[in-house]
Image (cartoon, rainbow, N blue to C red):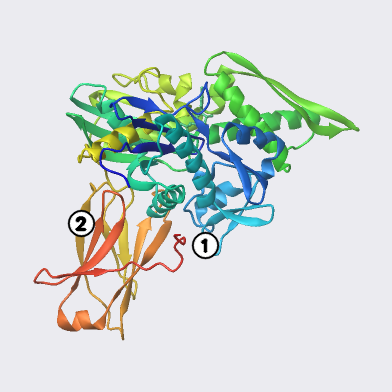
Amino acid sequence: MSTSADPILGIDFGTTNTAAAFFDKTGKLRVVPVTDKSFTLPSVAWFHAADKAIVGHAARRQIIDDPRHTIFGAKRFLGRRFQSEYVARHRDRFAFELLEAPDGYTAAKVYGKVTTLTDVAHLIIRQIHTLASHAAGAPFAECVLTVPAHASIRQREAVRHAAEMAGLKVRAIVNEPTAAALYYANLRNPEQTVMVFDLGGGTFDATLLSVQNKVVKVLATGGDAFLGGANFDELIAERLVDDFQRQHGIDLRPNKVVMQRLIFAAESAKMALSQTEATPIRVPCIAQKDGAFIDFQYTLTRSQLEDMVFQLVERTAAACDDVLERAGLKAEQIDELVMVGGQTRMPAIRQRFAHFKRLSSEKEIHPELGVAVGAAILGRNLARGVTGLADVVPMPIGIMVPGGGQHEVIPANTPVPSVRTVDVDLPPWPGPVPVALFEAVDRTTVERELLGTVRIEPEWRVANKGPTSLELRMGQDFVLSAALVSQEGRRQPLPIVDPRAPQRG
Ligand code: AMP
């Protein structure tokens, strides 16, 4: 049984890497060591049988040797419907098999067995939990989890469930940029306006925050759910494939395993080019011609890389401009651009944002660990009974009544916790009226996620004449609840029922 004095583990379960941190009983910040050289656990699971997997560095090495059974980047698909546009756009890029689980969500098929991505996430969180408990000398009972600012309610539920499966009670779910800002707030002057630029492996978030006396308030958030370091790797690999085809007349694209090896090599080259001006890329035995194997060989320079990914960097800049515009601010008014996510180590990205007054230094705000440390700070605050943050709803929540009437109830960027009430005119309907709750999942498309339905019973309508007041509440933990409210202020909670929701154990 945990007491408020027990440390709460801050976990950054990332698309590419997972990290964790906590404050020990003496109040000292501890980042969880993964190996003697590293504080990050690759978010990769290699299945060597249907029910047997290893995770982390050893699993990552299998992306090359056994790509069909090595699940990486699972967080991209976690809590996403298989039929969604996002999954359709991304699924073919992976050598492992993705499919639709009976609940409509995306799962992986390994050795003929359907493995949910929540299971994969659970394996990774369990491993970091084990490492953390080892470092602390006692098992953790509670954690704070981070998610991208754009994470939908379903995605938040899925990571929460994965952590619960790993034996951890989830005290809070915090947006990654907010966690980074909490970390930052503990380092800097009491009053600042900052923008967190978070470009990790899978997503890009730009978040404007005000920091006052170590309390962080989110002013606006935006970004691009389709943009991350992996897009850089894929683009480089595409160019390499074009070059190979010109040279040898062989198209490598149809072979997913070869493509995976090339993407992996592209990523290594990309990372090397953050330090050096040119780097060799060599992938042995990539194709066969006239009975002989051909190796892939190329020397990539930093300036070639920068030309290749120019448009991607511009997309991040456009998203930042959009966030600034929504908040009515200019880059010059921002005290610091806090860069988190491994991809921000690329020098061209730092140069592109040189017009900001100040950029966070890599040494001070560690791009890969800042989010986990922020989560640990929130954990410490929660253990003391304070939060020190004001987060916002990333995507609007709306309802639809039979007959097609739609209302946006909680707009994007509304601070949490928040309660909003909407008066709905219900159509004449025999029996209970089902009202559907939606989250607009993607700003760039009309894609929406059905969160569930509430049923308004005829008894309520008979007892309460006039329009029906429906109240939606989004908690600090991003859990949504609904209630009916009468003219006299009487509340009746309404369960949100979703027959297709992932089953919770
Ligand atoms: P994260 O999700 O924060 O762990 O970030 C992972 C992403 O950062 C991956 O796409 C990596 O390829 C990328 N990354 C890590 N280190 C570097 C580096 N030194 N230069 C460029 N990109 C990097």
Q: Residue at x 11, y 72 (%)?
A: 487
Q: Position of residue 186 (x, y in %)?
A: 25, 26
Residue located farthest toward the right when viewing the structure as drawn: 291
Res 317 quadrant in image: top left
Q: CA distance from mark 2 to mark 1?
A: 30 Å
Res 392 quadrant in image: top left
Res 374 quadrant in image: top left
The correct choice, above or below, for 174 with respect to 439 in the image is above
- The residue pinned by badge 2 equals 419
Q: Position of residue 476 (x, y in %)?
A: 26, 48
Mark 1 vs ligand 1: CB below 8 Å: no
The correct choice, above or below, for 220 with respect to 184 in the image is below
Tell me if mark 1 has few (under 14), some (14-19) or many (20+) residues whose alpha carbon lies within 10 angstroms of its own: some
Q: Which mark is residue 104?
A: 1
Q: Position of residue 130 (x, y in %)?
A: 48, 38
Q: Position of residue 491 (x, y in %)?
A: 17, 69
Three-letter amino acid code at disc 2? Val
Residue 424 visible, this angle: yes
Three-letter amino acid code at disc 1? Gly
Viewer-proximal residue, 275 or 417? 417
Q: Residue at x 31, y 55 (%)?
A: 479
Label 2: state its secondary structure. strand
Residue 442 visible, this angle: no
